[in-house]
Image (cartoon, grey):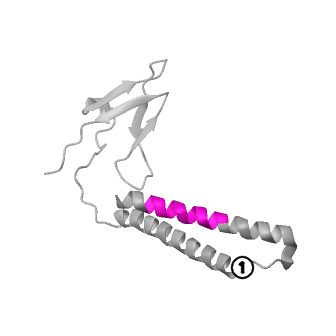
């Protein structure tokens, strides 16, 4: 419910800000830079822009707090069995290209994580692995 209310309020604040800026711009364009823009229009534009900015900031903060949580390792996939292909170690390969060409697998060197895999694709494919949690 709060999410819908948030969307409605931020949409209204954005529309009001745009309408107020359009009204002020129309006045300035019709009378030139000698036009006087009413103070209520400037105050209303400032208020709705502040509300919209506050709501937008809350959305960004809510999205970034998730990434700051501590992560718990629930599993790990290693590729320490090369030169054997992953399909020999419980990986399911499905080839989805017209030529039925499988990708090539090799051990990746000079990577930040030791034991990484290098996959040279020859078209579309799928590679699935049933992950089991660490006990």
**Is 49 in the magenta?**
no
Which residue occupies 34% across, 28% down? 93
Along the viewing direction, whichever of 96 and 78 lies nearer the viewer: 96
Furthest toward the left, the residue is 135
Where is 39 relative to 92, above or below? below
Q: Position of residue 124 (x, y in %)?
A: 46, 28
Question: Which quadrant: the N terminus?
Answer: bottom left
Residue 82 quadrant? top left
Which residue occupies 35% across, 63% down? 66
Furthest toward the bottom, the residue is 39
Along the viewing direction, whichever of 129 and 8 lies nearer the viewer: 8
Q: Which residues are magenta?
A: 6-19
Residue 49 quadrant? bottom right
Q: Is residue 114 visible?
A: yes
Which residue occupies 66% across, 64% down? 19
Chief SS of the magenta region? helix
Q: Is residue 100 left or right of residue 128?
A: right
Which residue occupies 19% across, 43% down? 132
Name the residue that disc number 1 marks. Answer: 38
Where is 81 relative to 63, above or below? above
Q: Position of residue 103 (x, y in %)?
A: 43, 29
Q: Is residue 30 left or right of residue 110?
A: right
SS assignment at label 1: loop
The mark total stands at 1
**Is 16 in the magenta?**
yes
Where is 126 relative to 30, above or below? above
Q: Position of residue 15 (x, y in %)?
A: 59, 61
Q: Position of residue 84 (x, y in %)?
A: 31, 33
Q: Is residue 13 left or right of residue 110?
A: right
Along the viewing direction, whichever of 52 and 15 lies nearer the viewer: 15
Q: Is residue 84 visible?
A: no
């Amino acid at each position: 419910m709060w999410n819908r209310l948030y969307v409605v309020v931020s949409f209204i604040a954005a529309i009001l800000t745009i309408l107020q800026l359009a009204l002020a711009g129309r006045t300035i364009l019709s009378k030139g830079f000698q036009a006087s823009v009413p103070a209520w229009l400037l105050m209303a534009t400032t208020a709705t822009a502040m509300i919209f900015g506050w709501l937008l900031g809350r959305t960004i903060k809510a999205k970034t707090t998730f990434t700051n949580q501590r992560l718990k390792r629930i599993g790990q996939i290693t590729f320490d069995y090369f030169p054997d292909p992953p399909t020999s170690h419980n990986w399911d390969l499905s080839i989805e290209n017209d030529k039925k060409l499988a990708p090539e697998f090799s051990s990746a060197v000079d990577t930040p994580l030791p034991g990484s895999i290098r996959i040279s694709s020859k078209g579309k494919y799928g590679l699935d692995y049933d992950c089991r949690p660490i006990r």
